[in-house]
Amino acid sequence: MAAWRSGFLDLLPAAALIADLGCGPGRDLAVFTHAGMAAVGIDLSEQMLRLAQAAGGRTAAGDIRRPPLKPAAFHGLWSNAALLHVPRPEVASTLRAWRSLLRNGGVLSLSTSLGDSEGWEAAPYRGDYPPPVPLRRWFVHHDRDDLLNIIEQAGFALLAVQEEQRRMTWLQVRAVATWIQ
Ligand SMILES: C[S@@+](CC[C@H](N)C(=O)[O-])C[C@H]1O[C@@H](n2cnc3c(N)ncnc32)[C@H](O)[C@@H]1O
């Protein structure tokens, strides 16, 4: 993760404007901020935003399917383990919305899970898992080639694609914004 994140930062200018889409508790947002970037984290969860702020990040509440951010303003978009919660019919429009936030030549770094299923899955976060009340999240796992095609159709050229095994198979994609539809 650290090497993948550094590779993203290396492609950006100093003090770049970065959005962390689905920032969660702000681990990556804090790294971007401490690296001197103008980073903002977007999340729907108020609790996650509070954690991200406590970690030193600047945040805004919003839906990553239509981020409440200025179009064509960003040098970089980072999204780790968040697109996997966007329902499949909304993935292409979400990627187009992300493309619209980037300047031409801006960089997208995306990490999401591979597979073919979509549905509720137990969230094994708590120490006392399984908890008395089931915790569930909506997961959408992607076919590698289908997702890469959607990313390209949204206006990106692929720079790097890699897979990593961590409980699930993760697809990490780095892509550059090429054209606006
Ligand atoms: C698995 S966590 C990943 C958090 C962080 N990126 C990380 O790597 O630790 C997924 C995050 O996406 C957020 N999320 C899911 N769907 C979202 C949506 N439609 N809009 C904004 N945030 C969303 C969740 O609230 C959660 O914080």
Image: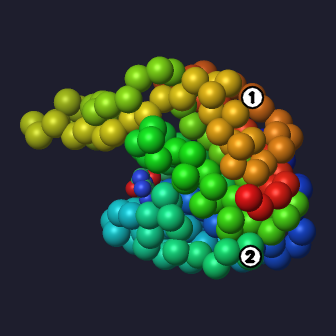
Q: Is residue 91 left or right of residue 175?
A: left
* Quadrant of residue 124 within the rendered picture: top left
Q: Residue at x 44, y 64 (%)?
A: 63
**Residue on which disc 2 sits:** 73
Q: Residues within 10 Å of mark 1 (few under 14, many from 20)?
A: few
Q: Nearer the viewer, residue 113 or 178?
A: 178
What type is the residue that disc 1 sits on? Gln
Residue 177 visible in the snapshot:
yes
Question: In whole angstroms, how far apart are the C-alphas of marks 2 and 1?
Answer: 27 Å
**Residue on which disc 1 sits:** 162
Q: Position of residue 148 (x, y in %)?
A: 70, 33
On-image quarter of the C terminus: bottom right
- Residue 52, numbered circle: none
On-image quarter of the N terminus: top right
Q: Position of residue 121 (x, y in %)?
A: 30, 31
Residue 31 visible in the snapshot:
no
Q: Is residue 120 above or below residue 110?
A: above
> How was the colour assigned to the protein in this rendering?
rainbow
Q: Residue at x 57, y 37 (%)?
A: 112
Q: Is residue 7 left or right of residue 50?
A: right
Question: Disc 2 on helix, strand or loop?
Answer: loop
Q: Is residue 140 left or right of residue 131?
A: right
- Disc on the earlier residue, 2 or 1: 2
Q: Nearer the viewer, residue 116 or 25?
A: 116
What type is the residue that disc 2 sits on? Ala
Question: Disc 1 on helix, strand or loop?
Answer: strand
Is the CB of the residue bearing disc 2 within 8 angstroms of ligand 1?
A: no
Closer to the eye: label 2 or 1: 2
